Image (cartoon, helix red, strand yellow):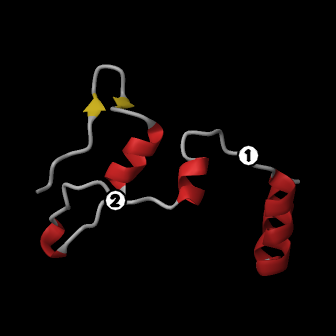
Amino acid sequence: MNKPCPFSDADLQSGGSPADHARCLLRKVKVGGNVDDAPTPVPQLILDLVGKPVEFRLAPCRQHQRVTVPGEFARERRADS
């Protein structure tokens, strides 16, 4: 139990593929912090995203911020000016 995920300190890379690393990191943690040694089944939706660049656009985030926290957005805009 509590077998660590493969990781190379020399090149700061995880061992195996990104999907293998996700399976290792998503293992079940039991009471007391004991982690299962067996890799966790990961949904295909997540496996399709793992290891790919993140597509991030600022405009939708700003719009969400305006809708959910209007006062905070106004203070931020004043600080930017």
Q: 11 or 67: which is nearer to us?
A: 11
Q: Quadrant of residue 78?
A: bottom right
Position of 6 compared to 58: left or right? left
> How many residues crowd mark 1 within 10 Å: few (<14), some (14–19), many (20+)?
few
Element class at badge 1 = loop
User: Can you tell which of label 1 and label 2 is closer to the viewer?
Assistant: 2
Q: In this image, 7 relative to 67: left or right? A: left
Q: Tag 2: residue type? A: Thr
Crowdedness near tag 2: few (<14), some (14–19) or many (≥20) residues, C-alpha within 10 Å:
some
Residue bearing mark 1: 55
Residue drawn at x 29%, y 20% is 10
Residue 11 x %, y %: 36, 21
Marks 1 and 2 sit apart, C-alpha to C-alpha, by 26 Å
Q: Residue 32: give x, y in percent of width and height.
A: 13, 72
The quadrant in which residue 70 appears is bottom right
Q: Mark 2 or mark 1, which is nearer the start of the sequence?
A: 2
Residue at the location (39% across, 60% down)?
A: 41
Q: Which mark is residue 37?
A: none
> What element does badge 2 sit on?
loop
The relative height of residue 3 versus residue 34 in the rendered view (above or below) is above
Name the foreground residue: 61 vs 42.
42
Identify the image quadrant of the N terminus. bottom left
23 or 78, nearer to the observer: 23
Residue visible at 73% across and 46% down? 55
- Measured as percent of width and height from the top left, residue 64 is found at 81, 70
What number is the disc on residue 40?
2
Q: Amino acid at mark 1?
A: Glu
Using residue 74 as the reference point, say whether residue 56 is left or right of it: left
Query: Could you tell me which quadrant the C terminus lies in?
Result: bottom right
Instruction: Tell me residue 15's x, y (percent).
Output: 33, 32
